[in-house]
Image (cartoon, rainbow, N blue to C red):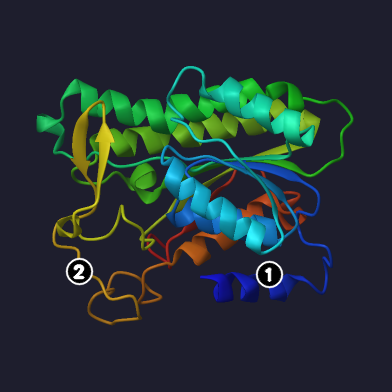
Amino acid sequence: MADRLSQVSGHLSNTYGRGLLAGEVAIITGAGQGIGKATALLFAKEGAKVVISDIDAKRLEGVEAEIKAIGGEVLSVAGDVGADEFPKKIVDATVDKFGKIHHIVNNAGFTYDKMLHTTPDDAFDVIMKIHVRAPFRLIRQAAPYFRVKGSRENRSIINVSSTSGLHGNVGQANYAAAKSAVLGLTKTIAKEWGQFNVRANTIAFGLIHTRLTASKESGATIEVDGKKVALGVPGAQRPDVPDEKAYAGIPLRRGGTVEDAAASVLFLASPLASYVTGHTLEVTGGVGI
């Protein structure tokens, strides 16, 4: 992963010598692994001061150590994004440490898949809570640091969605509804906060190789309200290299890596996307075109 992130950074270093996000402060949720971890590392390589959060404090410690090892500035705030006190906790900690906030990447989340007619209320409600209510509450808490008249600093809100939110998906009524709601939330922020030079965009990921898209038989789980929820896709045995048969529905004939995902987040946060707001960037390898 480190080599690939270095390669991505290297492509841009000639133009932005100190990094695309030099000196900017970014909050990244769900940063203990997967896309969130890769994004935190890439942001740090591009000069950002990163505030990382995850419900798994031990994993978060490991990411913090990796960021420090590459010379990055980092603050870890472990916690549950869905907890009532979380938004104030992480915003206060960020401002106490770094004085301001330039970017929020709402990445934390998980799947709780069931067919619609068998989905209980609690499985629907918890997905809406984590994927819609939690980002909304964090953004609202941070509003005073974004709604600043006359500021020309590079600032952005990036909410992670999914192709399930664009097209629906069998077995994901809760997740698809939540990820669709994120699109409307983001567009509203773009319209309300554009006058403060704040950009708001969504990324809809397709197949990215993470624990959420791995084989359910691999045994990855998450605990939700005392219950163990199995993550992944039943029978999903996918190679990690281009394959004509396994990825016949993807024009690029491969699944995406977490580094691919992180690079798209970096683009939307960076000055390269200074005139992009209210947009949903589909990172899918060409699916849906």
Question: Which of the 4 image quarters holds residue 25?
Answer: top right
x, y percent for residue 105: 58, 42
Q: Mark 1 = which residue? A: 9
Q: Which amino acid does label 2 sit on?
A: Gln
Relative to 178, 189 lies left or right: right
Can residue 81 be seen in the rendering of this structure? yes
The three-letter code of the residue at mark 1 reads Ser
Residue 49's spot in the image, x, y percent?
72, 47
Q: Is residue 234 left or right of residue 205?
A: left
State the residue at coordinates (47%, 55%): 35
Q: In which quarter of the image is residue 132?
A: top left
Mark positioned earlier in the residue sequence (2 or 1): 1
Left or right side of 100 for 29: left
Other residues around mark 2 within 10 Å, as few (<14) / some (14–19) / many (≥20): some
Residue 154 in percent (x, y) is at 79, 44
The residue that appears at 26% across and 36% down in the rendered structure is 223
- Residue at the spot x=29%, y=44% of the render? 168
Look at the picture and state if 84 lies above or below 111: above
Asked if labels 1 and 2 touch by Cβ distance under 8 angstroms, the answer is no
Residue extending farthest to the left is 118
Q: Residue at x 47, y 43 (%)?
A: 30
Residue 31 in sight from this viewpoint = no
Q: Is mark 2 on a helix, strand or loop?
A: loop
Q: Residue 237 carries which label?
A: 2
Q: Which of 97 and 109 is in front in this view?
A: 97
Residue nearer the viewer, 116 or 191: 116
As helix, strand or loop, the secondary structure at mark 1 comes to: helix
